Each structure stands twice: as structure tokens, then as C-alpha cells.
Amino acid sequence: MQYQFFKIHHFRGISSLEVEDLKQINLLVGRNNCGKTSVLEALFLLSGMSNPQLPINIHHFRDLMLLNDEDFSYMFHHLNFETPIILRGKIDNKNREVTINPLLIDYSPHPKNRQKQQDLNNQQEMLTVSTNIVRLIEGIKLDFKSNQQVFSGQISIKEGNVKLPIEYKEKLRCAYLTPKTIMMHLDKRMEGLLIQKKLSSVIDVLKGIEPKLIDIRMGAGGMIYVDIGAEHLLPLNIMGDGMRRILAILTAIADIKNGVLLIDEIENGLHYKSLNVLWKAVISACKEYNVQLMATTHSYECIEELSNAYIGLEPEGDEIRLFRIDKKEDTHTAYKLNTRSLSAGIEKNFEVR
């Protein structure tokens, strides 16, 4: 499954953004605070639109704990609950859409409870106040469409419950890796490669980072060991970040077969000389497992090596796109470079970031 386009309205700092002509390998670039990470988060929510837990997860990825339902405002543009979040996309020629609104509870205070109402005012725990009614936030509701059918789910921190749309089963598989979560569940993904007898191809890739690598093995408790010809096997954790991160990315691609993989700061922890190894392996793995990749980067070397690796593997192909996200005041625009224009821009030393 692959996205062909997506639209974001009123999510975090993005008032409106449309990205079209997505391909198998898509790289998002742009200056700091232009919204690249927010784009990945929005796609994650759209891909898992039937899972009301995801709005909490994307904040955990930022090390931000939501303590009450009012904290869901961090998702809304200008922290404004009155403007719903709307995410749309087309994947394999099928439209999908999710709208996120706050769950509002009307509270009519008794005259004796005016002090309580004033306390609520002071704590800004209401959305609007009329003469007699206080509207409190008690969660969020996700209304989504798939194949013209409408479903809904909701989550409330205060009530401590999640309402799932049991009549809907999501077919799209999507995973989101950040620099802090990329190593999570690596042991389980490694086990999948072992079962599929696909580990040897990953080892061949990793030899580009560590030429002495002979084998990778699983130990007790999910521990991963590498054989580099020493007297004993060595824990993967003591090896360099380059080997560990490339292994994590390749196992994630294999694990999300026929799905979509989102990676924030894909170059994080990698020396620039390892980037060509990374991209050759990623391009081949995405093709083998039919995975669409969307990743962000700040690195010009990362962009350059993606272009070089793809042209080297697919001289006549056109399956990579670079989108530069520009922000001017409250307006976001995505400028697209296709395979050829990206290669030409790099050749002429244009600033493509």
C-alpha cells in the first residue's frame, strides 16, 4: 500500500499543507521548525485512524506526557479546540480521512458553586463560558471515513478509557521510528528475519559498516550478539551506532511488509560515509518488501547519497521524491523535486534543502 497524496489541516503548527505525487521513497527536508516531524505525526494518525491511543503515543515520542484532557490542545492549531484537525489522503486509489474534535461536557454550576466555577476559569479548564454553562474537555473524538463508510473512536484521560470502533478493521500497516524509539522491539523484528531466513542479506549490508562481521545471533532474553571473529560473541549494544541503526531500519522495513514506514531524522547517528550503504540497502529492501518510506533529514549528505544510490541501482527509475517544506508566517508549502531534478540540482550544487 502506498500513499499518493495527503492533506493536513489545523494540526500542530500547520494550518494547511498538501503533498502530492508521493513515490516509494520520499524525503522531507526544510529548516528547523518548518513542521517536518509534525507531517510524519499527522501521517501516523491518518494511517492508524481507528486507534484513538495514537494521539497520546505521538506525544510520548516527544517525551511529553499528557496529564489531562486539556493537554490534547497541543495537537490543535494555535492550541485552539474550536478548529478541528482534518487529515486526508489517498492510498492505492482509496480515500481516507479522519477528523479530530474535543469531547465536550456541559457543566451547569449551582449558584452555591460559583467559587468552583471561578476556579475553573482560573485554571483555563473550559473551552467556552456562557452565563450558565461551562464546557469542559473530557477527551477527543476521532471520526474517520474509509470507502465511504464512517466510523468513530474516542479517548479520555480523565475517564481512563478508550472507545474503539469494533466494526472496523484496519488493513494498512504503518510504523513510526524516531531517534529515541528506533531500537525498540529490535529483538522481535530480528526474530522475524530469522524465521524468514532473510538475515544473511542484512549481514551482507552491515559488512559495509563492519567488514569483520561474520554472523548475527539471538541470545536469551532478546539479547542480540554479533560474531566478528573474536574469541566470544559480542553484544550488539557495544557496536557502533551505524551498525545498530541500519539493522533497526532494515528489520523495520521487513516487519512492515506491504505497509508504510515513517522515520524521523533517518541520518541520526550515522557517519556520512555510511549513508550510501544505508540508502542502497533501504531502496532494495523497500522494493523487496513493497514498503513506502517517508523520512525527514537535515543532512545534505543524506540527500546526496539517496540520489546517488538510487541512480546507481535504478538508472531509469523514478521512485524517489524530495519535498522541501517551507513556512512563511502561517503558510506551509511543499516544493517537490523528482528523481531527475534532484540529481540535476545536486550535480549543480543547488541548495535542495
Image: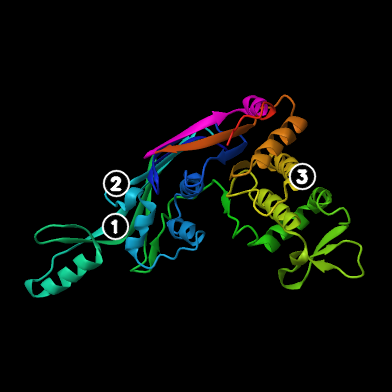
Q: Residues within 10 Å of mark 2 (few under 14, many from 20)?
A: some
**Cβ atoms at labels 3 and 2 below 8 Å apart:** no
Which amino acid does the dot numbered 3 rest on? Answer: Val
> What is the number of the mark on residue 83?
2
Quadrant into which the C terminus falls: top right
Residue 263: in sight, yes or no? yes
Instruction: Give the magenta-colored segment's residue range.
Output: 329-345
Q: Position of residue 119 (x, y in %)?
A: 19, 71
Give yes or no for residue 343 being in the magenta stretch: yes
Q: Residues within 10 Å of mark 3 (few under 14, many from 20)?
A: some
Sequence-earlier tag: 3 or 1 = 1
Q: Quadrant of residue 220?
A: bottom right
Q: Give the label, 3 or 2, closer to the camera.
A: 3
Q: Residue at x 12, y 57 (%)?
A: 130
- Left or right: residue 323 versus residue 78 is right
Distance from disc 3 to disc 1, alpha carbons, whole Å, reads 48 Å
Q: Give the label, 1 or 2, closer to the camera.
A: 2
Q: Secondary structure at mark 3?
A: helix
Q: Secondary structure at mark 1?
A: strand
Which amino acid does the dot numbered 2 rest on? Answer: Thr
Q: Is residue 58 above or below residue 223?
A: above
